[in-house]
Image (spheres, grey):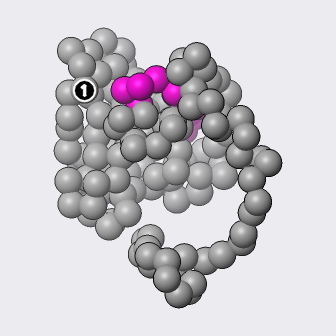
Amino acid sequence: MDYQGGCQCGRIRFHAAGPRDLASVCHCRMCQKASGGPFMAFVRFPATQITWTTPPDIFASSNMVERGFCSQCGTPLTYRNTSTPFFSVTINSLDNPDAVHPELSFAPGQMAPWLRSLDSLPCEDIDPATTPGLISHQIP
């Protein structure tokens, strides 16, 4: 299977020729900080299987990890442990994120405790693009 995706503004696009490797979520503090959210979700590919229209901008978040992002719109796109031949892309940057379901959870001890209670919250099915008072988002 082939996977395609990119950043929110469309400047960076990628194509990953399958088969894919591991899909996971990571709850570590580094991923929380990098995403601004409670976790990050990735799908891993051998680095040789990914091609880019424009390579992502890189931030070395540690002495062995590089994170790719779009410097124009800020979308987090990749995670790469520099000691391995793999490249992970964020699942929700895929054009079809429903095609990948995480199979492993990293650092569950650092999971935000309130995540377990999300199913009990009241829900409201709204479209931010058409609801007055909410910020409208353009997603290519």
Q: Which residues are magenta?
A: 17-31
- Residue depicted at x 72% and y 69%: 124
- Residue depicted at x 79% and y 48%: 120
Q: Residue 3: x, y in percent?
A: 52, 49
Circle 1 sits in a helix, a strand or a loop, which is it?
loop
Q: Residue 107: x, y in percent?
A: 54, 18
* Quarter the C terminus occupies: bottom left
> Residue 82 is drawn in which quadrant?
top left
The answer to whether residue 27 shows anywhere in this view is: yes
Task: Say which of 75 and 111 sits in front.
Answer: 111
Task: Say which of 44 and 76 sits in front.
Answer: 76
Q: Position of 68 compared to 30: left or right?
A: left
- Residue depicted at x 39% and y 42%: 35
Up-down: is 123 above or below 107?
Answer: below
> Residue 138 is drawn in which quadrant?
bottom left
Q: Position of 35 compared to 27: left or right?
A: left
Q: Which residue is the extreme one toward the right?
A: 120
Q: Residues within 10 Å of mark 1 (few under 14, many from 20)?
A: few
The answer to whether residue 17 shows anywhere in this view is: no
Task: Say which of 26 and 112 sits in front.
Answer: 112
Q: Residue 131: x, y in percent?
A: 57, 84
How many discs appear? 1
Up-down: is 107 above or below 136?
Answer: above
- Residue depicted at x 49% and y 77%: 134
Up-down: is 66 above or below 84?
Answer: below
* Quarter the N terminus occupies: top right
| Amino acid of disc 1 | Ser
Residue 47 within the segment the image draws in magenta: no
Q: Residue 125: x, y in percent?
A: 71, 72
Q: Label 1 belongs to which residue?
A: 61
